[in-house]
Amino acid sequence: MKFKQIKAVLLGLVFCATNASATLITLETRNINQSFDQSNLLSSWNQSTAGTIKNINTFNMFNTGENKINMLTLDFNLKSNSTWTFENGLDAGYGAALFVNGSLVDSRDGDLWWNKTWGSNGVFKVDNIALTTGKNIIQLLWAEDCCNGANSVRFSEASGQEKILSVDNINGLSNVSPTDIPEPATIALFGLAIVGLVTRRKLQK
């Protein structure tokens, strides 16, 4: 492998390390197309074309647009098995569905509107979500025709207090563990040291 290739690989590792996080929240939004099927949101999602995707720190009062189908993904690690509750305050004219580690846990048909009130009947609440030790992925899927109302999610662990869904609130739980990778600073320092040594050797030649 040439020097430039080695350097590029090592710098890439450093970049990945500095962006490592114990928890990742991703929001992806796509346009509703002609093949949209309200009775099967997952199939409609898979058939829709790619849209916008971004990592976010907090999901609170998000307006995702009209005629959109949305996927909110929470990726995190647990130290031990746990049971959570998710409360989804949505503007979802076509309903919503919640998946845990690839399996459908619950869904709501019809027009959902929480009216920015957690006590509303329009809140899509899912209790007794069984999560296992290690990596867990929770995905919330919902679709809206109009009128671009605000969307929020809050959660609670076991019988704990409800909290707005955010990276800080997830990482603040004692049961959440870092991802199974070395500490970012360790990788960064190691990578930079290797780059420095290779550079020095190259110059000496």
Image (cartoon, rainbow, N blue to C red):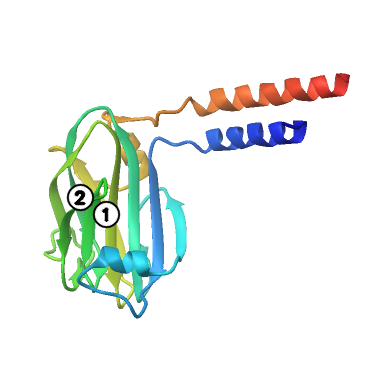
- For mark 2, does the 10 Å Cα neighbourhood hold few (<14), some (14 to 19), or many (20 or more) residues? many
Work out whether residue 60 can be spotted: no
Horizontal and vertical percent for residue 20? 48, 36
Q: Which mark is residue 86?
A: 2
Residue 165 to residue 184: above or below: below
Residue 50 to residue 204: above or below: below
Q: Residue at x 35, y 64 (%)?
A: 46
Q: Residue furthest front?
A: 1
Mark 1 vs 2, N-terminal side: 2
Horizontal and vertical percent for residue 181? 45, 28
Q: Which mark is residue 142?
A: none
User: Label 1, on which residue?
Assistant: 153
Q: Residue furthest right?
A: 205
Give amino acid for label 2: Phe
Work out whether residue 51 can be spotted: yes
Q: Residue at x 26, y 74 (%)?
A: 37
Give amino acid for label 1: Val
